[in-house]
Each structure stands twice: as C-alpha cells, then as structure tokens.
Image (cartoon, grey):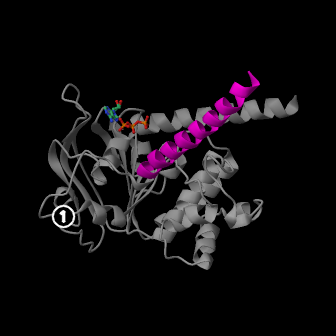
Amino acid sequence: LMQLAVPLNFIGSVYREIRQGLTDIEQMFDLLEVEPEVSDRADARPLDVTEGRIRFEDVHFNYDPTRGILKGISFEVPPGGTVAIVGPSGAGKSTISRLIFRFYDVGSGRVTIDGQDVRDITQESLRQVVGMVPQDTVLFNDTVGYNIAYGRPSASRAEVEQAAELAQVADFIRMLPDGFDTMVGERGLKLSGGEKQRVAIARTILKAPPILILDEATSALDTATEQEIQASLDYVSKGRTTLVIAHRLSTVINADEIIVLKEGSIAERGTHGELMQSDGLYAGMWRRQLEANKAESQLRKAREAD
Ligand code: ATP
C-alpha cells in the first residue's frame, strides 16, 4: 500500500500543479478581460480620445432573446465628470459597464466615446483608454509589486511605490514579509477583498486611463477600510471621466448625476440633493441604508459590551 501511496501522492501534486496552471490561465483571461463575444471590424480604427465623453443613446440590450435587460438607456458622462449608477441587484448596472468595454454589442441604440461608436474602434485601443476597478480583483500568482506594475509594465519601482502610496496600500505592503516582493494570489499570501481592491486601484493609478469605471464591491467592508478605499477612489477619479457602479450610497453623494436603474430602465435621475428632495426610490434607498448602518453599529456596540 505504501508503494502505491507515494506515486498517488505524486500524481496528486502534479494534478494540483496542472489545475493551478489552468486557474492561472483563467485568471489571466479575467484580468485581460478577454471575451470571445465580439471581434474587431475589418476597418476598425483605434479610439481617438479628445475629451473622454461617454454617451449611451437609447441602448437596448439582452443576453438572450427571452428577456430584455436594458430597455432604452440614455445618459452621458461629461469629460472629467462622475456619473453614478445605483439600483437593486439585477437591475442591469454591471451590464452597462460591460457595454462600455464592448464585451457585448448593443441590440439597438449606440454607445460612443468622444462620438466614436465602440463597434467601430479596435478593442485593444478601447481597453487601453478605459480603466476598470472591478468588484473582485483577481491577482496574478506573482509579487504584489508585479501585480501593481501590470497597469504599466514599463513603470519603475519608484512609480509602483508611489501608486501604492496614492492608493493607501503602501504601508500595508511594507509590513508584508518581503514588502513589494511578497508573493500574492492563490499560491501566495491571500489578501482581503479591501486589500485586493486597493492593489487594483494602485494598478489603475499607474495605468492613468482617461476614462474610469469603478465597480464597487458588494461585500461589506468595515468603516475604516471603506473610508481608505473611498479616499483612494476619489484620488484616482479626479479629473477623469468616471462611471461608478455604486453599491454603497456614500460613494454617490458627490456625483454630477445619479442614475437610478430599475428593471433595465432609468427610474430616476438627478443629483443627490434633487433626488432626496423628490423623495422617491433613491431617498428610500438612503433611508434603508441609514437604518442598516444604525442597526449594524448597535450590534457592534452590543458585541463589544459582552
Ligand atoms: P448586482 O447589483 O447584483 O451586481 P446588476 O444591476 O449589476 O446587479 P447585472 O449584472 O447587470 O445586474 O445583470 C442584469 C441581469 O442580467 C440579471 O438579471 C442577470 O441575471 C442577467 N445577466 C447578467 N449577466 C448575464 C449573462 N452573462 N448571461 C445571461 N444573463 C445575464
């Protein structure tokens, strides 16, 4: 039996290596945001960014013909401005960000950047211009420094460290066993959701794209982490055209426009002040969030008292 156990063990570890290799490839595709759904037109041109204006013009979209997901969406993110999209789970918020990246083509209507339909430009140029901080960042099985530098591989170590500083993650990284050379990812040190997101923000700061999509994590973060992330997001979005898929209402207060999406249609739109005044869906979401926050802090106090 012993004789058998050794090779089986060996096969087990080879198998794990292969599995891990496959996971790496899957993660790489995730990271490169490769989607086989669309391809460049024969005459596709690189995107020419003049000011960084995003426009949705009466966009209809569905993943499968039986169910409409976006039903006539029109909005504009002005150059350097911030638009936040809020709404219940499944309303179609993330779908909007996928259409900007052209992971899928619209059913009708159009999505343009500086007047150029995203279907007419090369995907490579589109993905260079649009930076994305996703909900769940997948890290390469490599050093944390490499993971940040991936935003701009030619960056120097000093630039990587500066980006980490601006993303409020440098102090954390310096405390790791090997600092910026610490291995992270599935095979290295596992980072928390908030830490991974700050690494993603540092990567984006280094990439410095003119257009930014922030897809906030749905997972609850503690208040301190949320504030740190908020500060680094504020930094990265300054002066850039930014679309925020917001799950936390605290993020949206300062947006130039808030779009409340419901079942694929725009139910309300306006600034925080306007929407609070009109006392509709958005105001209701705020009240619920405030109540949830209150309940949470009471729970925490009760636990601390125990
Ligand atoms: P959440 O806040 O939960 O992230 P969301 O508003 O971002 O939700 P979307 O991810 O845009 O919602 O999804 C909108 C709808 O489209 C959902 O009902 C979802 O089930 C469906 N959907 C999303 N991705 C696909 C897909 N690849 N194929 C088919 N249906 C999809």
Q: Which SS class for mark 1?
A: strand
User: What residue is drawn where x is 47% and y is 57%?
Assistant: 254
Which range of residues does the magenta coloring cover?
Answer: 1-30
**Which of the two residues, 176 or 181, is positioned nearer the viewer here?**
181
- Up/down of 194 relative to 14, above or below: below
Place of residue 49 in the rendered image (x, y in percent of width and height, measured from the top left):
27, 72
Outermost residue on the left side: it is 43
Examine the rendering and report whether any part of residue 202 can be seen.
no
**Which of the two residues, 285 or 111, is positioned nearer the viewer here?**
111
**Which of the two residues, 167 or 3, is positioned nearer the viewer here?**
3
- Up/down of 95 relative to 112, above or below: above
Quadrant where the N terminus lies? top right
**Which of the two residues, 293 or 40, is positioned nearer the viewer here?**
40
Q: In the visual, does 21 lie left or right of 268? A: right
Q: What predominant SS class does the magenta segment belong to?
A: helix
Place of residue 263 in the rendered image (x, y in percent of width and height, measured from the top left):
31, 31
Amino acid bearing label 1: Gln
Q: Quadrant of ligand 1?
A: top left
